[in-house]
Image (spheres, rainbow, N blue to C red):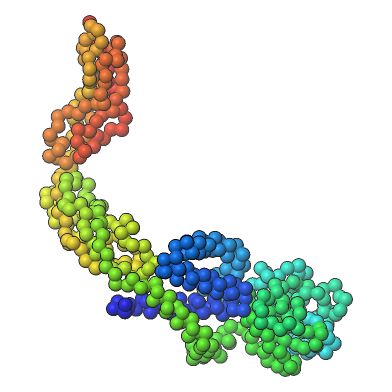
Amino acid sequence: MFSYFRPQDIADILIMSFLVYQLYSWFKNTRALQVVIGLGFLGLLYVITKNLGLFMTSWILQELGTVLFILLIVIFQGEIRQALYRFSLLRNLFDRQDNPSQIDIMDLANTVFSLAQEKTGALIVFQRRENLDDYLLHGIQLDSLPCSQLLMSIFRDGAPLHDGAVIIREGRIAQASCHLPLSSSTDIPQYFGTRHRAGLGLTERSDAAVIIVSEERGTVSLALGGELSRMDSPEELYDTLNTILSPPVQEVSTTTLRRKLFGNIVPKMAILLFVLACWLLITSRQGAILTVNAPVKFHNLPKELALIKTTPEEIEVQLKVFSNLIPSPKEMDIIADVDLSRAKEGVNNIAIRSEEIKLPPGVIIAGLSRSTIRVVADKKIIRHITVKAGTVSRLPGKLRLRSAKVDPPTVVVEGPAHVVNQFDQVQTEEIDLSLIRQSTMLERRVLSPSPQLRVLRDEPVKVRVLTGR
């Protein structure tokens, strides 16, 4: 199996491991990840039932998978859009970053703990690199600095905007009284209410940071990445916010390469092993040799030449297949498209190059039944040839055919020289004289006397039939 383990295979495994880990990091503890795990179980069940020959069960699972795929796109379109946004390499160039210099983080931390001491519930969202507009509902637009007096006024019980979250974007309060998506995680303790579920729900779907002040217990928590951390003092909240709201360049500079590679090592290794197992399953046909007959076609024949004969008309190709995802080459249209740009008049032995055989990805050529083909070409000429009216039967009664004149009297034909020189005239389509009662004018097309000749006239010619007694 590993006899043809290429560097591309290593890159393939590492890239897929990175993408799967990113998806896991973004969607863990969310409804989307739970659905993906369920679909993975159904996929595994489908593979097992198919290999065991359980035709009805495997057929039902296959048809069900097609329907579920469409439903997932509809149901999780928001998550899919956010995942594609996160994969974008250009978003860092165009996204506007938060400006922490406009926020007095220490003052904000003291305000939050003042609300907690008064047991006034609060929900404060910091938009970081990812836009949150897709997740915010019923917000009231504001544009002001997040000062202590304003935050106390917003969250005071009975105030018009106290129900919902405050959104801080680019160092300013952008919206208030916003409704956030609730978390569907089953790991959240029962004593956490709607406010905590809303804060966690938003951080599960984005990189936002959310401060949650409990109205019942008077505690302060910080939600980030779908995880909740309790803050015990304004200083601790200040240090945490100051770290996560710093510009991305500072975050990157403080994160070592070793921490990136070996941090959270257990899920990384599990995902790597999972991707490796999938790769081995997909490439289980690696090295299988199949033989197919590929028809020979041609291109780039010089304009002054005409193709007379080719030998053979198809060749046997031995193919090596590297993936179960690829249909059998016998089910695909594989052709040898040979370049004749160097062909000359007479007999040519043309070499068949591997790149002239059209193959799908994951299939390579293991061998050819022959490396050359025999091509006979002749000089192509153009010549004027007389046109004769093609007639059948006889005129009725005592009528006689005086003449059948063709206009124009000649046409131009094109083809190999030795074929063109064999003919002095060509005929029109047949005219049944038994149907003619008097002199008349008819239109008929010119017929080519040989498949190798081409008549360079698309319009029918006129045939004047003159009769007499």
What residue is shown at x 26% (from left), y 21% (from top)?
A: 431
Quadrant for the C terminus, please: top left
Above or below — where is 419 with respect to 439?
below
Along the viewing direction, whichever of 220 and 94 lies nearer the viewer: 220
Give the left or right position of residue 278, taking residue 305 as reference.
right
What residue is shown at x 45% (from left), y 68% (from top)?
A: 49
Q: How many marks?
A: 0
Q: Position of residue 360 (x, y in %)?
A: 34, 63
Q: Position of residue 226 (x, y in %)?
A: 64, 81
Along the viewing direction, whichever of 325 and 204 lies nearer the viewer: 325
Quadrant for the N terminus, please: bottom left
Above or below — where is 403 with respect to 350?
above
Considering every residue shown, the one lying at the far right of the view is: 158
Dividing the picture into quadrants, the one containing residue 417 is top left
Q: Position of residue 277 (x, y in %)?
A: 42, 78
What residue is shown at x 32% (from left), y 72% (from top)?
A: 286
What residue is shown at x 22% (from left), y 14% (from top)?
A: 394
The answer to whether residue 51 is visible is: yes
Q: Position of residue 61 (x, y in %)?
A: 50, 64
Give the left or right position of residue 93, taking residue 106 as reference.
left
Dividing the picture into quadrants, the one containing residue 404 is top left
Dividing the picture into quadrants, the one containing residue 27 is bottom right
